[in-house]
Amino acid sequence: MTTSDIYGRLSDGREVRRFTMANKKGEYVQVLEYGATIHSVCVLDRYGNLGDVVLGCESGERMEGFQRSGRVVGRCANRIKNGRFQIGGREYQLECNEGANFLHGASDDYGKKLWSGRIEGDSVVLTYADHDTVGFDCDVDVLVRYRFDDFSRLSIEYEMTAHGDTVLNPTNHAYFDLSGTGDIRDHDLWIGASCRVSRDEDGIPDGGAIPVRGTAADFTYLRCVREAMKFDKGGYFKGEPYYDEFYILDKQESGKPVADLYSYNVGRGMRTYTDMPGLVLFTDPGAFTETGKNGREHGPFCGICLETGFVPNAVNCPDYASPVFLQGSQLEANTVYEFYTR
């Protein structure tokens, strides 16, 4: 069953609707029009208790300033070095909002826009017309479809139609905490990736790949995040240990997950499936605190992100899968988060 209500208003007075998708087990997912945001994912644990496993803002009035939310990021998630790239011999210069680099769509970031939502059968459909203002020099029509089924699977389907030659790389920035403790370092994690990207002196992917085997970045077997951080014998971490890493996914058999996150404390797990070529692992180091739902304070390691997509800066690195889409072409991508108990 899928319903909608008014969640709140933006600072300019526009209403933001909230959509609730419930399954037969009493679990539910809530999605907001603002940012096409995954606001709540309430699923069962091994004891039969319902718990919300994503971070979100405490009220409808705080949507615009809240950072740790499951918003859709686009049209190009993550970074493009110097905000510069070429397609077909033409050079593009984008707005740079992280020092010298372009990040997460800059001022056109989809996660900071009001989308138009509707209920369509068993799904919630959100659409947005991206009228470029940051240098891509073409518009894009965007559709995101959310489904939540009786098998506790939350699917995200992206459809983006380019009205010119451009870069398309959407993702969802949900922060997960399967145990509800506020510290995700005791989660176990497996990622189906034998390599991570190499980076230049500015930390931007440069086209290479580095094997993870035997390092703190190695999640090719189910491994406690905290123990992986402590393991760092090879100097993976350059300062305070936390992950902000992009993995190049190994080729998976059809229908097989690319990642598995598990909390032994409550017996709740989450498998990730995708047809995208890469995965960002981000464990929030807590540079600032933030008050979330039910007045809960979010600080260091309050959430873990598993974001699917193309490699950052791939438009400038031909050895990575290309995020370039020519005029009239369409990106179709799918990511599924499947929740289970054990």
Image (cartoon, rainbow, N blue to C red):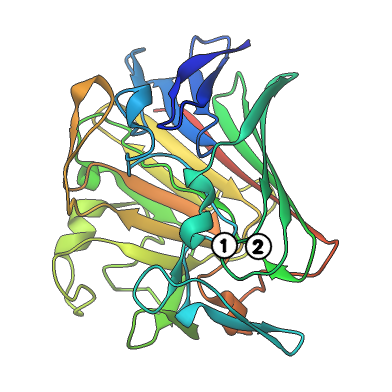
Q: Position of residue 167 (x, y in %)?
A: 66, 68
- What is the secondary structure assignment of the residue under circle 2? loop
| Disc 2: which residue | 168
Q: Earlier in the sequence, mark 1 or mark 2?
A: 1
- Kindly indicate whether the residue at mark 2 contacts the one at mark 1 (C-beta within 8 angstroms): yes
Instruction: Give left or right: position of 160 versus 258.
Output: right
| Residue type at tag 1 | Cys
Say which residue appears at 59% left-offset and 62% top-offset. Answer: 133
| Residue type at tag 2 | Leu
Q: Position of residue 109 (x, y in %)?
A: 51, 53
Foreground pick, 216 / 183: 183
Q: Is residue 169 above or below residue 145?
A: below
Instruction: Give left or right: position of 274 versus 67.
Output: right
Residue 241 image-quadrant placement: bottom left
Instruction: Give left or right: position of 93 versus 62.
Output: right
Q: Is residue 189 above or below residue 326?
A: above
Say which residue appears at 44% left-offset and 47% top-offset. Answer: 173
- What is the secondary structure assignment of the residue under circle 1? loop
Q: How many marks?
A: 2
The C terminus, quarter of image: top left
Foreground pick, 215 / 51: 51
Q: Position of residue 146 (x, y in %)?
A: 62, 32
From mark 1 to mark 2, how far is it between C-alphas?
5 Å
Q: Residue furthest front?
A: 12
| Disc 1: which residue | 76
Say which residue appears at 47% left-offset and 53% top-offset. Answer: 307
The N terminus, quarter of image: top right
Q: Position of residue 316 (x, y in %)?
A: 58, 83
- Please tell me how crowded label 2 is: few (under 14), some (14-19), or many (20+) other residues with Cα within 10 Å: many
Instruction: Give left or right: position of 28 versus 148.
Output: left
Q: Is residue 197 visible in the rendered structure shown here?
A: yes
Residue 154 image-quadrant placement: top right
